[in-house]
Image (spheres, rainbow, N blue to C red):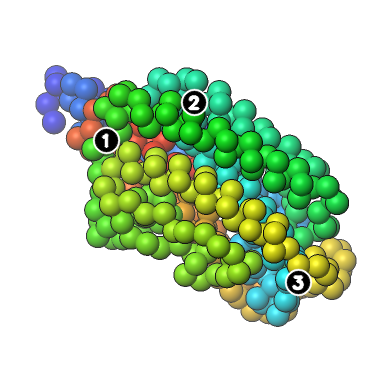
Amino acid sequence: MDDFRSTEIIFGPQHPGIHGNFAMRLELEGDMVRRARLVPGYLHRAFEKLMERRTWHQNIALVPRICVPDPDVNEAAYSMAIENIMGLEVPRRGNYIRSIVLELSRLAAHLMGLGGLGGAIGLYTLPMWTNGERDYVLDLFEALTGGRVYHMYTWPGGVRWDMPENWPRKALKVMDHIEAQLPSYYSLFFESKVTDARLKGLAPITTSWAVEHGVTGPNLRATGLEVDLRRDDPYAAYEELDFDVITLKQGDGMARALVRWYEVGQSIRIIRDAIEKMPGGPVIAKTPPPLAFMVPPGDHYAHVESSKGEYGYYVISKGGKYPYRVHVRGPSFTHGIDVLEKMLVNQELADVALITGGLDVCPPDIDR
């Protein structure tokens, strides 16, 4: 590239269009991106190594930080891997509560992500509204787990304790409230000429390209491929719950946003269904106390469908109080490096924040 025609800039981590603390080194020709390289390392690091020096239960407080907007998938996948190695069977009621927690986490993450996308476009009313609704979801988490952002609620064997007596009623009230606001949000965002001009046709990808580059979750379903681990490889109570797998075919910025939008309604549907079908009984299997908790030798890969895509934990035990190795397969590691760097080439500088936000990248997953 001609040095007199090219410019190199650092985009982020302070840029408001970046969904988290990472930067990109962009080579520009005019206002067109000709080359993009991620600059990670601004967040928590070495999680996987730290887990080797912490007991099985101490890691429950560590893993949610690998994806702050959607933390509970980490607790679930990590616990599921341990349960498989130990042969633990989670009580049916515990699995139902896990499904509710995971859908609340997905709901909060999608509201936050869509609001950020609206802010990147310039529709600043949307993040004000969606973050306000997200606070009601965090209120539910606080009432259930004691924590608003990090919960440490899903443990090997089930969940730490049962729901408070009046919590299901509060949850249903919040679901009714959010659902009642959705038409106004849709009108504000998706019926806006600005949104249509900025997202329609933005950085489209095909199904074959997405599969080749390891794209998962809403970004893959936006290309038309009907893949969802909650249905295809059921865990928790999803096999007994009613929901649709949302897909669109365009594969562009608008499709990626719309898939997440419709999934908000599906999460509300799943939460209601789980509360209605909630069985009785214990919520956690009988296990030794945390300080005496031992896992026999073995290994297992457990995965769940997060708001960002496939989230997996490969756990190896050599027997004892600590994991031997833990590896996290987070979707943002793929979406935020290989996929994002390729998608930004030949895009306008003004669209960099929209493409990044549309992929819904979670930077701690990259830095882990």
The amino acid beneath tag 2 is Leu
Mark 3 surroundings: few (<14), some (14-19) or many (≥20) residues within 10 A: many
The residue identified by callout 1 is 200
Which is more toward the observer, 37 or 230? 230
Q: Secondary structure at mark 2?
A: helix
Image quadrant occupied by the N terminus = top left
The amino acid beneath tag 3 is Pro
Mark 1 surroundings: few (<14), some (14-19) or many (≥20) residues within 10 A: some
Where residue 149 sits: x, y (%)?
Answer: 69, 40
**Residue at the spot 33% in from the left edge and 60% down from the top edge:** 225
The residue identified by callout 2 is 126
Which is more toward the observer, 51 or 142? 142
Task: Please tell me which of labels 3 and 1 falls first in the chain.
Answer: 3
The residue identified by callout 3 is 91
Q: Is residue 345 left or right of residue 100?
A: left
User: Residue farthest to the left?
Assistant: 2
Task: Please tell me which of labels 2 and 3 falls first in the chain.
Answer: 3
Asked if marks 3 and 1 touch (Cβ < 8 Å), the reply is: no
Rendered view: 242 above or below 26? below
Where residue 2 sits, quadrant-wise, is top left
Where residue 220 sits, quadrant-wise, is bottom left
Where residue 313 sits: x, y (%)?
Answer: 57, 63
Mark 2 surroundings: few (<14), some (14-19) or many (≥20) residues within 10 A: many
- Label 2, label 3: how many angstroms apart (C-alpha)? 40 Å
**Residue at the spot 58% in from the left edge and 74% down from the top edge:** 300
Asked if marks 2 and 3 touch (Cβ < 8 Å), the reply is: no
**Residue at the spot 73% in from the left edge and 76% down from the top edge:** 88
- Label 1, label 2: how many angstroms apart (C-alpha)? 18 Å
